[in-house]
Amino acid sequence: MGEASNIEPLKFNMSDMNDDMLHTLLELVSDGIWDWNANTGFVYRNPGWYEMLGYPAHSLDNNVLTWESVIHPDDYPHVMARFDDHLAKRAPVYQAEYRCRMHDGSYIWIEDRGHVLARNADGSVARMIGAHRSIDDKKRLLETLEQRNHSLEAIVEEHTRELNRVNQQLQIQLEENRKLAETDVLTSIANRYRLENALPLACERAQRFRRPLSLIAMDLDDFKNINDHYGHALGDAALVQAIESVKRFVREGDLLARWGGDEFIMILPDTPLADAKALAETIRHGVADLPPVGDFKVSMSFGVVQRFDEEQQTGLMARADQALYRSKIAGKNVISG
């Protein structure tokens, strides 16, 4: 989200100032200030927050997913642990140091601090405010001092350049290997391994921020018959053609993955059931417009579900699969939820 350098407990009554007045005031503050209304999901970030990360002011979505998206993946677990400790009253304030992705793709170290201002009757968070500040210079200075303690500066710099070059090559290779490990060879979308890693995280986010999460399970109708009549090569071609059509409707933040065979799963963060069904209907029509494979009209069946409160990924997947099965029983090329 952001952080507050040395946040002190507020000395004035926030209720005397409405959101517009508060946010107008924060527009004048140079530090990176953020204000999270947990009951609505709205997150205000002042221009200082954007400027520190190199983004135009107010250019990103006003929700918690924006914050999550700029946290370095290696730092994400410990940041969320600190955040959850404060939400659960195990820590008096939220404070973390981590790397944030800037607009140009590079990373900057920040110190992030925040404090819950109000809670609901059930103890859950209603309002939280905080700020962040750059500690990148301090981090880089410490790194330089540590290097000088081990060797002469010139030697260290030369070794550092070489290590950076090798590291970049390794990072490129590791990224290529990661993509290969998480990508389905036939359809070039996410594979089951990536889905099984992504879905628990999506459930955790939905639980933490009390946001809706929906799944769409889908598969190709009569896929076995197509394979039996025309062979696996043409069957695979039909599968790829159908998924290329589905990919046109995948939104930013969604994940489309191959579960196995001709069955696919789409994770829809921050999406209620009605919107998920509407998206499934759009996909269904798009696939139905594809040319037939021999005597077989290409179509897909869908099962659409929204996550229950406290529900984990196993139960959510099971309900999606049951909904898909009902669509098959109902005559195929339909949507059940």
Image (cartoon, grey):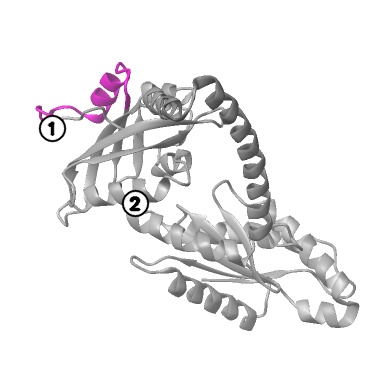
Does 160 sit above or below residue 223? above
Residue drawn 69% across the image and 69% down it? 300
Asked if residue 316 lies left or right of residue 285, the reply is: left
Residue drawn 62% across the image and 58% down it? 256
Disc 1 designates what residue?
Answer: 9
Mark toward the start of the polypeptide (2 vs 1): 1
Magenta region: 9-32
Q: Mark 1 packing: few (<14 Cα in 10 Å), some, or many (20+)?
A: few
In the picture as drawn, the residue positioned furthest to the front comes out as 151
* SS at circle 2: helix
Residue situated in front as seen by the camera: 157 or 204: 157
Residue drawn 24% across the image and 51% down it? 85
- Write down the quadrant of residue 331 in the picture: bottom right
Q: Position of residue 36 (x, y in %)?
A: 30, 39
Quadrant of the drawing holding the N terminus: top left
Residue situated in front as seen by the camera: 20 or 45: 45
Q: How far apart in space, not on screen, are marks 2 and 1 (Cα)?
A: 24 Å
Amino acid carrying label 1: it is Pro
Question: Any magenta on residue 21?
Answer: yes
Does 248 sit above or below residue 154? below
Q: Position of residue 12 (x, y in %)?
A: 10, 27
Amino acid carrying label 2: it is Phe
* SS at circle 1: loop
Asked if residue 234 lies left or right of residue 52, the reply is: right
Residue situated in front as seen by the camera: 7 or 239: 7
Residue drawn 84% across the image and 74% down it? 296
Disc 2 designates what residue?
Answer: 209
Residue situated in front as seen by the camera: 184 or 62: 184
Q: Nearer the viewer, mark 2 or mark 1?
A: 1
